[in-house]
Amino acid sequence: MPFLNVAASGSSGNCCCIEHGDNLIFIDAGAAYKHVADALSETELNNKRISLFLTHEHNDHIKGLKPFLNKLNPTVYTSEGTACELERKGFDVSRFMIIDPDFLYELEGFSVTPFSITHDGHEPFAFRFDLGEKKIAMATDLGVAGTYILEHLSEAESVILESNYEEKLLTEGAYPEYLKRRILSHKGHLSNKEAINAVGFLSRDKLKKVIFAHVSHENNSYDLLDKYSAFCCDNFGVEAIYLRRETVVRKIDL
């Protein structure tokens, strides 16, 4: 049984880890190393094979990258575009593994399929992991969830999916207009409504569990997410939970 451990999720930082057998599969390193250590025991960090998959180069996904690399020495996988941007920011990417979208990569103990998402980074990715008979996908920081993305997600029984903002809270809120336009754009973030629509579509296939993630502090609310999670259960037969901002979580069943 794979587990999800969360060091951070939200606009201030993102770092999750799928624990599967001898593997710790991290997605992004946008958290202080202390929170990574809080999410996983030292025994786990010292005795398991560690991989790091980077979705894109925005600060809330890479701000803990240097200590992460220094302390854990993971095998790092990312797109060529993200690697180039990280090199420009001063990172040594010479040992990073450059991967392409829509290819199945067979690794030790699991396989992964990266796929492209629409966001304002340089070649951002989402990922689907095949862990034996279990398939888990993670897609955050995407402006839209169109047919291509839904096709990739439809293979998974568990999906970690962005549910960033409530449109009314965003449009009537205090954000400057340029930032509102960015978030609402097809290269911005996924709204609650768009996330629920995606769950409804995916529930026709294999989806059993959805974990809503990357929740905005200013433009969303836990009360709304409670209602949306209950809606998914009642109407789609899908178990739904959400990740709270700046909250370390251990051992979520996937």
Image (cartoon, helix red, strand yellow):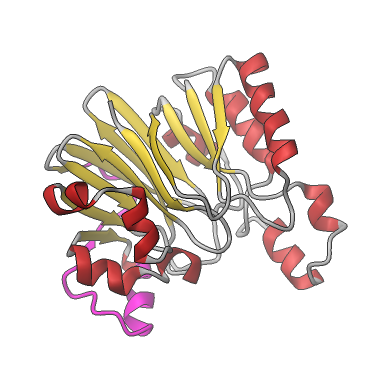
What residue is rendered at 62% in x and 24% in y? 200
Residue at (57% x, 41% y) in the render: 146
Q: Can see residue 62? A: yes
Image position of 58 with respect to 41: above or below: below
Count of number-bearing discs:
0
The image shows residue 122 at horizontal and vertical percentages of 45, 68
Magenta-drawn segment:
81-105
- Where does the image place residue 208, in percent across and percent down from the top left? 47, 20
- Does residue 147 sit above or below 221 in this rendering? above
Q: Nearer the viewer, residue 217 or 147?
A: 217
The quarter of the image holding the C terminus is: top left
Q: Residue furthest right?
A: 172
Q: Position of residue 202 (x, y in %)?
A: 53, 25
Quarter of the image where one finds residue 113: top left
Magenta span has 84? yes
Using the rendered image of the protein, determine whether residue 193 is visible from the camera's viewpoint: no
Residue found 73% across the figure and 45% down from its top: 221
| Vertical placement of residue 244 versus 246, above or below | above
Query: As drawn, is 48 to the left or to the right of 234?
Result: left
> Which quarter of the picture shows residue 63?
bottom left
Residue closer to the observer: 162 or 151: 162
Q: Is residue 56 left or right of residue 52?
A: right
Q: Is residue 117 left or right of residue 189?
A: left
Q: Residue 104: x and y, percent?
A: 24, 41
Q: The N terminus is located in which quarter?
A: top left
Is residue 238 shown in magenta? no
Query: Residue at coordinates 42% horizontally, 36% vertically from top-left?
Result: 152
